[in-house]
Amino acid sequence: MVSDDVLVERVRSQIGRVLSHPHAIRVTANDGHVRVSGSILAQETDNLLVCVSAVRGVKGVENRLEAHEQAGDLPELQGGNGRSGARREWLQANWSPATRLLAGTIGCGLMANCLARRTPGAGLLGTLGFGLFLRGLTNLELTRLTGLGAGRRAIDIHKTLTIAAPVNEVFDFWTHYENFPRFMAHLQEVRDLGEGRSRWVAVGPAGISASWDASITRIIPHEELAWQSEPGSVIANAGVVRVRPAEKGGTRVDIRLSYNPPAGALGHLAALLFGSDPKSAMDEDLVRLKSLLEHGKASAPGKRVRREELVGVTSEQSPDGAVLAPGGQGI
């Protein structure tokens, strides 16, 4: 059986063939059922739905698209290239596994030739080889690898989890982001500036701190919360959290973050080499979040936090710390 994460990657690798603005589309999957949402040009809608339905492992497609006859002033639909059909694989934003493997193999060969010959020409080819190797390894376009012209989207992180707590409770927790440093290891401080603005301070590799201001861009109570960094931020970033009732009870949380560190994905790769892995760190943070909402306590690096210590948390708890629904019934 294909995992939801793999299915999402398969879909994303295909939609660039039929869309002029593939990055405007959000893709999520649940047990083989794929949901597509975001802004799209109306004339491309049918092609997208047919394309997604044809992806191996897709059992069904839920259409949550916002179709527009023209791009208008929508920033996500500006620029782009028209699609009259499938583009050549090498021009795709997302490469297939076979193309990535080929690019990595060619890249390694060119780098080996550079080390063996050590001539200016070999050095130039070695640089090209290094680019091909990274392109195949990360499946990111050149702009996102270097961070040049990539805006907030050099790196994407997508996570989904189910929390045994009511939807409204989980959503309210996310809106009190000043609590995040209590369970997120990389955050030192999040301060509410009022009017949907906040100041964030994070610690990176080698203990280096970075700060930026962010603004809420969209909020649908108990459904969706989106934000983005303000212009001039050291680390351009954006994110969206969506919550909905899980089929077997509790809340399904879908989190998508995108950020552009200095030097783009190359800077991200350098951070990995020095032991800082944002994706793994986020996994650990979400485990603590789940424990905090389900059991009322969690352990963060060097500290322990209990639910009653947090701002804006009003849920009842049993004596052992378990979260209680209204009326005192455990969930």
Image (tube, rainbow, N blue to C red):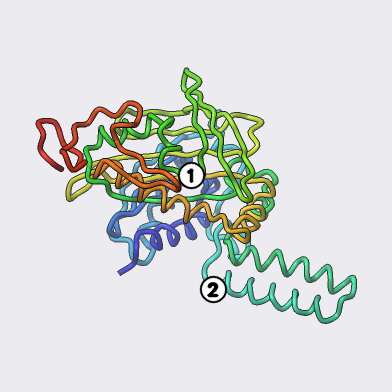
Q: Quadrant of residue 76?
A: top right
The amino acid type, in three-letter code, at marker 1 is Leu
Left or right of 141, for residue 176 = left
* Residue occupying image coordinates x 54% and y 45%: 21
* Residue occupying image coordinates x 79% and y 79%: 113
* Position of residue 103 measured from the top left corner of the image (x, y, whole percent): 64, 71
Few, some or many residues within 10 Å of mark 2 (<14, 14–19, 20+): few
**Residue 120 against residue 316 in the figure, above or below:** below
Front residue of 160 and 310: 310
The quarter of the image holding the C terminus is: top left
Q: Quadrant of residue 178?
A: top left
Q: Which residue is mark 1?
A: 257
Left or right of 79, for residue 256 = left
Front residue of 131 and 198: 198
* Position of residue 207 measured from the top left corner of the image (x, y, whole percent): 61, 46
Q: Which residue is mark 2?
A: 98
The amino acid type, in three-letter code, at marker 2 is Ala
Residue farthest toward the top in the current orientation of the protein:
195
